[in-house]
Amino acid sequence: MGNDARKHFGTDGIRGRVGEEPITAEFCLRLGWAVGKTLANGRSRLALIGKDTRLSGYMLESVLEAGLVSAGVNVGLLTPIPTPAVAYLTRTFRADVGIVISASHNAYEYNGVKFFSAEGVKLRDEQERAIERQLEQDMKTVPSNKLGKVQRLDDARGRYIEFCKGTVNRRFRLRGLKIVVDCAHGAAYRVAPGVFSELGADVSVIGASPNGVNINAGCGSTCPDQLVAEVVAQGADLGIALDGDGDRVIMADQNGQIVDGDDLLYVIANHGAKTGRLDGGVVGTSMSNLGLERALKAIDVPFARADMGDRHVLEAMRSRNWSLGGEPSGHIVCARLTTTGDGIVAALQALVAMVETGKTLADLRVGMERSPQSVVNVAATNPQQAIACGEVSKAKRDVEAKLNGRGRVLLRPSGTEPVVRVMVEGEDAERIAGHAKALADVVRTSAQG
């Protein structure tokens, strides 16, 4: 394996179907050891391990713990807790690495392992490559007197709740607001309701009965239909849907209209620009709607696109010294407040705009006119190979010719699941949907061939 090769790491850690390489007990034992050896270098260090509510998380936690201890690293075990909480706790506990066992928005059959540095940010490419190189070495346990120790950190959830509340003014209150919160039967089910209710909101909770296999199933940010129905039925002021590990958020306004990541970026940026809380501009991605770019331009807020993935968004933000960025999926980074995408923190920033202006979420969206966009996910064992097919390239050029410079076509492999994302954007919704379906059919044939 060459110095630049990464066999297992994708855009957000290591992910796959449970029981298949690399998400097996054997591999994750070696992974824990490799991380420990890369981190410890013969010295006792501290690693935190958090997880979401997947049944497989307990198996993977056990073997990662054993691997780390065998490399001489001390381990702090957290209760099921959101991914951004692990980033925060890694900093506050002065740990050397934070490890999250989660496949985020994916179904329970999948799981993954992602890492935060001591600063609470995703690992750099060279750090991931170092772990990959260590995985190629023979696994050897340190002497018995050098083994790591393990402790359970029982106050982690409360610490994170206080952190989230601390991202808003001490006098900020949500009194008078009725909010429906969908926790996706995931890691935030005992955190998110506490944050919003302790700030004074009347909170109605759904998706908060995890059983190990219902995470993201018909609920959460990837499937907000239940949230919308509850907001309308209860006459709530808004709804908040998180994903399985709590780093994404999708909202619904009082009319039951979905407010996605692009909408939230506009709401937060617009209010931030008016109050002096926005540093520079906004970083979106290749999937960000053209309407967001135009809306931000209308209020004189710069906009830049990065590759998909929160690491790329963060890199683009840092290079420009900007404080806000995110993805249409609701993965939003408020860098003035935290180091990674955080669904609860992002939702609070939208609520700050509501409370301080006295406007509804629907009112705050005015000015953000979306361009028709159609996204089709096509299952593919090898997404890169499917995209590289000559017939797919020809079909893409044909669609671009039909758009005649008045839209965009994007084909990209997902960094979190085995699919190709086919996106077509333009002026006419019906035509755009037809183009996306036709192009997706060609990609599907390529993937099956």
Image (cartoon, helix red, strand yellow):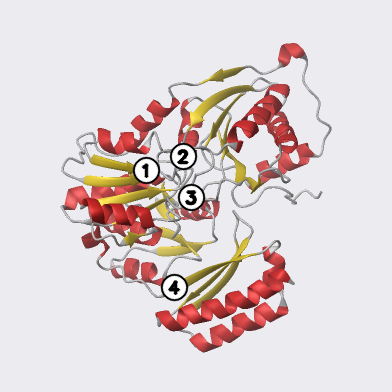
Residue type, label 3: Ala
Instruction: Name which residue lies at 61% across and 43% down.
Output: 112
Q: Quadrant of residue 140?
A: top right
Residue type, label 2: Pro
Residue under pointer 2: 84
Residue under pointer 4: 373
Instruction: Name which residue lies at 42% across and 54% down.
Output: 330
Of the numbered discs 4 and 2, the one sitting upstream in the chain is 2
Above/below status of 199 relative to 381:
above
Callout 1 touching callout 2 (CB < 8 Å): yes
Under tag 4, what secondary structure? strand
Crowding around mark 4 (Cα neighbors within 10 Å: few <14, some 14 to 19, many 20+) is many
Residue type, label 4: Gln
Of the numbered discs 3 and 2, the one sitting upstream in the chain is 2
Residue under pointer 3: 217
Instruction: Name which residue lies at 47% across and 44% down.
Output: 340
Instruction: Tell whether 449 sits left or right of 258.
Output: right
Query: What distance separates the C-alpha of mark 3 from that of mark 1?
Result: 20 Å
Crowding around mark 2 (Cα neighbors within 10 Å: few <14, some 14 to 19, many 20+) is many
Query: What distance separates the C-alpha of mark 4 from that of mark 2?
Result: 29 Å
Query: Which residue extends farthest right?
Result: 138
